[in-house]
């Protein structure tokens, strides 16, 4: 069963192509990440699937239903977490959820029960009458998420669920999203962070300029872009060439990049622990003292660099 | 969408606003206190030097003007609320739900009209407290209130339309500033006859002037002695102007709302 099918979606704003022949399929019960930089078309794509934007060209089916032909039926099956928190700041979390419950036609009693249930599930039941204004960013986003789950949607859209949150807020939201998976909900989330896609998604589509430029599982994608990276910072810029030679000789290491200003070198590696082991030993043998050593995920910039060969 | 759900959704959206007032009683009090304060300032600090064309007490002239002003300024509140909901994506969420989309606007409208009725009552109370009286029959007093609410209803749809256009609360300021010259180039505070030639003509044809003159006449207050065509047909214009504004703003707002999906 396919939860989402997009075929050749196009949408232009003036001369700007926000969606440029976008294709994507998402199987039911999976988490799919749409990874792309600012202006890639993520929000436009999500809004199209959530029946908020008219399909200009192409077709989109959500839960097997054509978005353009029967939007009302699509709306009964989806939940939407927009890019900005769409809750009422003046009201309490409970009031917000009850309001949405009534608008989903649950009736007063069931709306209240559902609100209590969701507050409990997202760790917000002790917020009482406090208005949303007084919530932390993470709490607000969790409430927003709860609001998108009133009817236990078959398909949930999350547009940059953690952008603007501190690391703690991000972890809170990640945990909340993880708790949904397994319940059979299909999740389509957009993000600018490779790590987020890696943490949450079964499959990832990288999009740019309104089209998919790469997709696959996190591992497949990392294979394409060289996986994890190792950064080495040395004491003085004069040591950089020697250190670069050492890093290049590490098994599974890719092309080494030099940054003179930060006295650092960086390279993709196939197996992070193995490479780290090798590198520490080799640096020691070469008599180069490293000031800092770090293993990290490639940034979105580096992913694009690898996939498109162009700097953004 | 069945009519029953449409009604239920509209009422739920209205209750959302009522719940907001209940949580912020002070916010409501402050927004109601502002026109009362204006009334007091104009009546006691500035009013001493003001002449009413055709003679009469300035306070009796001022109160109907302030009632009109309160109704006209309602536009700002409506516009700000719509722009906020749109800017924050709240309207997006409503539109992604299986509710009647128009309930978003209907709920806003009902809540704003209720608020305007309350502020009208408070302003009338404040007017009575500073010595204003109506001298006509109860029927004409009700007619006056009807005209005031008709103007507010036109402003409601203008506010919804403008709010949907700007879509961002920070741009609302610009409109708030523009409202003032419109208010001062009406007969809310001064008779058009006392203004310099062209400004007097502008003021004569200002929709706020039409409602103010008609309301003064219905309340039996002074300041209805103007001799221009507009002044002599104030009752007609007080009905016509809001209807013209509605005939423009309502379809534009509805089209803009539907066009959010473009
Ligand atoms: N209402 C609009 N009017 C004009 N241009 C628009 C509009 N909405 C989006 N665009 C343009 O379409 C392109 C795609 O926008 P979109 O919001 O979908 O990107 P995004 O991937 O969500 O970006 P971000 O990460 O900044 O949220 C951008 O170039 C944007 O400027
Ligand atoms: Mg976006």
Image (spheres, coloured by chain):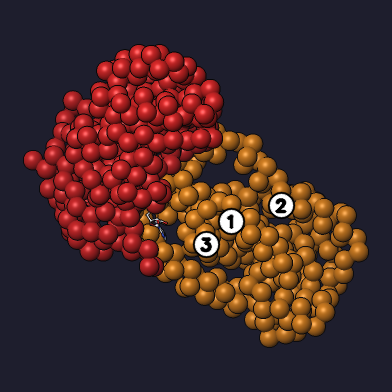
Chain colours: A red, B orange
Q: State which tag comes first along the sequence, 2 or 1.
A: 2
Q: Nearer the viewer, residue A64 or A165?
A: A165
Answer yes or no: do the residues labelled 2 and 1 have beta carbons within 8 Å? no
Residue drawn at (42%, 27%) of the image: A242
Residue that badge 2 annotates: B35
Q: Position of residue B223 (x, y in %)?
A: 78, 72
In depth, the one of A117 and B15 nearer the eye is: A117
Q: Is residue A224 visible?
A: yes
> Within 10 angstroms of label 2, few (less than 14), some, or many (20 or more) residues?
many
In three-dimensional space, the C-alpha distance between marks 3 and 1, rounded to whole angstroms, equals: 10 Å
Q: Quadrant of the C terminus of chain B?
A: bottom left
- Label 1: which residue? B171
Mark 2 or mark 3: name the one nearer the start of the chain. 2
The subunit carrying tag 2 is B
Indicate whether B6 appears above or below A245.
below
Residue at image mark 3:
B162
* Ligand 1 picture quarter: bottom left
Q: Nearer the viewer, residue A307 or A232?
A: A232
Taking B198 as reference, is A289 left or right? left
Calculate the distance from the C-alpha at mark 2 to the C-alpha at mark 3: 23 Å
Which quarter of the figure has residue A211?
bottom left
**What whole-number distance in Å separates the C-alpha atoms at marks 2 and 1?**
23 Å
| Residue A219 disc label | none
Check the residue under mark 3 and report the chain it is in. B
Residue nearest the observer in this picture, B250 or B153? B250
Q: How many other residues sit within 10 Å of disc 3, few (<14), some (14-19) or many (≥20)?
A: many
Query: In front of the other: label 3 or label 1?
Result: 1
Residue drawn 49% across the image and 62% down it: B165
Residue B35 located left or right of residue A140 = right
Of mark 3 and mark 1, the one earlier in the sequence is 3
């Amino acid at each position: 069963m396919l939860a989402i099918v997009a075929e050749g979606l196009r949408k232009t704003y003036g001369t700007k192509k926000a969606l440029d022949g976008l294709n994507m399929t998402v199987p039911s019960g999976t988490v799919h990440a749409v990874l792309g930089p600012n202006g890639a078309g993520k929000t436009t794509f999500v809004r199209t699937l959530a029946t908020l934007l008219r399909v200009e060209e192409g077709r989109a089916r959500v839960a097997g239903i054509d978005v353009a032909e029967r939007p009302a039926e699509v709306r009964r099956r989806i939940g939407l977490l927009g890019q900005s928190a769409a809750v009422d700041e003046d009201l309490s979390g409970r009031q917000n959820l009850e309001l949405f419950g009534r608008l989903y036609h649950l009736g007063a009693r069931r709306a209240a029960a559902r609100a209590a249930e969701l507050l409990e599930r997202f760790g917000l039941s002790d917020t009482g009458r406090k208005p949303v204004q007084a919530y932390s960013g993470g709490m607000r986003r969790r409430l927003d998420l709860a609001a998108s789950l009133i009817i236990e949607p078959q398909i949930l859209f999350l547009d940059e669920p953690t952008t603007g949150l501190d690391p703690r807020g991000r972890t809170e939201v990640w945990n909340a999203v993880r708790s949904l998976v397994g319940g059979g909900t299909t999740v389509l989330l957009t993000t600018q962070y490779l790590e987020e896609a890696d943490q949450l998604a079964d499959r990832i589509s990288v999009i740019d300029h309104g089209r998919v430029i790469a997709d696959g599982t996190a591992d497949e994608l990392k294979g394409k872009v060289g996986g994890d990276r190792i950064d080495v910072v040395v004491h003085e810029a004069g040591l950089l060439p020697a250190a670069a030679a050492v890093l290049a000789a590490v098994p599974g290491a890719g092309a080494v990049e030099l940054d003179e200003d930060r006295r650092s070198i960086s390279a993709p590696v196939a197996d992070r622990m193995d490479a780290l082991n090798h590198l520490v030993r080799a640096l020691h043998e070469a008599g180069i003292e490293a000031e800092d050593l770090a293993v990290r995920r490639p940034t979105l910039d580096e992913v694009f660099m690898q996939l498109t060969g162009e700097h953004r | 969408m069945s009519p029953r759900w449409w009604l239920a959704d509209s009422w739920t959206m209205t209750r959302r606003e009522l719940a907001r007032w209940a949580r912020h009683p002070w916010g409501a009090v402050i927004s109601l206190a502002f026109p009362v304060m204006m009334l007091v300032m104009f009546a006691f600090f500035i009013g001493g030097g003001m002449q009413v064309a055709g003679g009469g007490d300035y306070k009796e002239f001022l109160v109907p003007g302030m009632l009109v002003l309160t109704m006209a300024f309602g536009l700002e509140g409506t516009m700000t609320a719509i722009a906020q909901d749109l800017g924050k994506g709240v309207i997006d969420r409503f539109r992604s739900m299986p509710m009647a989309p128009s309930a978003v606007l209907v709920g806003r409208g009902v809540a704003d009209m209720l608020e305007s009725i309350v502020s009208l009552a408070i302003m009338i109370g404040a007017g009575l407290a500073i010595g204003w009286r109506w001298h006509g029959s109860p029927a004409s007093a009700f007619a006056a209130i009807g005209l005031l609410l008709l103007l507010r209803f036109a402003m409601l749809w203008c506010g919804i339309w403008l709010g949907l256009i700007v879509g961002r609360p920070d741009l609302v300021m610009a409109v708030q500033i523009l409202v003032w010259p419109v208010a001062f180039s009406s007969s809310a505070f001064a008779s058009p006859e006392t203004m310099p030639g062209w400004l007097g003509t502008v003021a004569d044809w200002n929709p706020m002037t039409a409602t103010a003159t008609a309301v003064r006449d219905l309340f039996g207050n002074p300041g209805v002695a103007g001799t221009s065509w507009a002044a002599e047909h104030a009752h007609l214009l007080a009905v016509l102007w809001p209807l013209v504004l509605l005939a423009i703003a309502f379809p534009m707002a509805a089209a803009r709302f539907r066009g959010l999906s473009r």
